[in-house]
Amino acid sequence: MIDLTINTDLAGTILTGFIHTEITRTGLKRAVLGLSGGIDSALACVLAARALGPENVLAIRMPYKTSSADSLEDAQKVIDVTGVQSLTIPITAMADAFIATDPQMEPMRRGNIMARCRMVVLYDYSASFRGLVVGTGNKTEILLGYSTLFGDSACALNPLGDLYKTQIRQLSRALGVPASVIDKPPSADLWSGQTDEGELGFTYSEVDQLLYLMVDQRFTPDECVSAGFAAPFVRAVVERIKRNQFKRILPPIAKLSNRTVGYDFLYLRDWGT
Amino acid sequence: MKVNVALAQIKTRLGAVDANLEKHLAVIKEASAGGADLLVFPELSLTGYVLQDLVPTVACRPRGDDPVFKPLLAASQSLDIVVGFVEEDVRNRFYISAAYLSHGEVLHVHRKVYLPTYGLFDEGRFFAWGEHVAAFDTRFGRVGMLICEDFWHASPPYLLWLDGADLFLFSSASPARGLGPNPVLASTEWVDDINRAYASLFTAFVAHTNKVGFEDGLHFAGGAVAYNPEGELLGHGPYHEEALTIVEMDMNQLHRTRARLPLLRDERTSMVLREMTRIVEGGGTNHGRWKAGEA
């Protein structure tokens, strides 16, 4: 029996402590985050509001012209529930200015451009609001590489990156994320009708169980098959994890000197604080 | 004899020794005002934990002429103090150390003998391995000190027991991990379990304290704890926040427990040595790290 249940009080305590500590120790006291109307950013928003006080959190809705109206409404529910500050900055003009340069552009490229436009907005408001960008990527999507490099994965700190999507749902229910946000099918909302599970080809609850065995419990792929997972599914997930390692690390620097950033120049970000 | 033992669980600034020293002096005052006879700080309490390349810049020497130890030794006139620090030896090797300070003297220094270098840990890359596990006499009886991974192994507490320790002082900077359905993380629960086990198995006092706060994404949960020779809980600090937990140890409990349960009296140390020798010298490879030359 694979049990991904977490103690939500404990998780909430640690994650709010993390957000508060890792932001305030830089000398700042505020956070900026993109609010998509989905569950991950809703949970990040609730945690940030608890950690810093809602007046210190700026949630930005960044719709593109194809984004669904439901997303905006769901994001508004999160803003209302948490009481955080909010802005709506449509990205259509900035994204389309570039998308128009290539009429052949396929959906994935357009989706990446939208994700990176949102990153530009968040980092600009990070400077003007004097807050750090709180990331919303979860462990499932980080392991599967289901994100845009330098787009939605860009952040100053990530409170959710060690929670599987299944656990995100559990914690969201416990912390009062609106039900409509929790219950709708997860989607990057980059084009109409897109869903994560449709695009990935499997459900989060299936893949979370497999990832938990492989990553947390260190099962070999063969052992996962013995545990009841279909061999092609296991192979596909292993391949995805491997192929997307580049998204999880800083770009490698070619070593020339005796001391090189990343190899033998080693300091935590919290250096001196 | 009754001893008030204060267990400090503090946040530290990473690599900022002066700021951490200031906090130590404030906590020492607080513990002293609270009637503590002995105050224990966590592992690397003067420096923070994930030091990496900061190690050589935060090292000090536990002597009266060291600018960090000078004020700590002065403060140890009012109560005994255990502090955690990076120690640089005369040949410029760096250790994770704990020093026991009493009446202006350094009574004992323990250098961590087990450096976890696996999983999220990388201590063996930055530190030298301590080579000694020894108990020492204090005004409260004979004490043994260990640092974190030292007591995840059963042998160092066992050696201290045989060397006469009746009071075990354990310090940690243990990144909390293992979130599941329970209200306590698996790693912190495990530490409580083994501390209680050592108190029961060795019919001795065990006191443990642990760092608090965050270093990047690592979370240190605190949760100081103390058990008496019956394995009974004497006190437990909170999780996730700074605290000073003061417990009273009635050292006469050693007499009462050992009258009932003579585990120490009956311990067959000569047999242990004989069998250890057979196991280690016998050419087998079942005994952990192999000796040099073994294949």
Image (cartoon, rainbow, N blue to C red):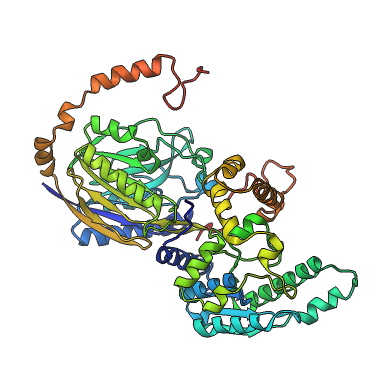
Q: Is residue B53 visible?
A: no
Determine the residue positioned at 55% across, 80% down: A78
B28, above or below A214, in the image: below
Q: Quadrant of residue A201?
A: bottom right
B191, above or below B129, in the image: below
In the image, taking residue A33 as reference, residue A94 lies left or right, namely right
In the image, taking residue A75 as reference, residue B185 lies left or right, namely left
Farthest residue to the top: give it: B282
Determine the residue positioned at 44% across, 71% down: A174
- Percent across and percent down for residue A37 are 61, 77
In the image, taking residue B14 as reference, residue A234 lies left or right, namely right
In the image, taking residue B256 as reference, residue B60 lies left or right, namely right
Instruction: Please tell me which residue lies in front, B207 or A86.
Output: A86
Instruction: Please tell me which residue lies in front, B125 or B180.
Output: B180
- Percent across and percent down for residue A4 are 48, 57
- Percent across and percent down for residue A213 are 54, 48
Q: Quadrant of residue A219?
A: top right
Tally the numbered discs: 0
Instruction: Please tell me which residue lies in front, A149 or B219.
Output: A149
Q: Is residue B263 visible?
A: yes
- Percent across and percent down for residue A152 are 67, 67
Determine the residue positioned at 27% across, 42% down: B197
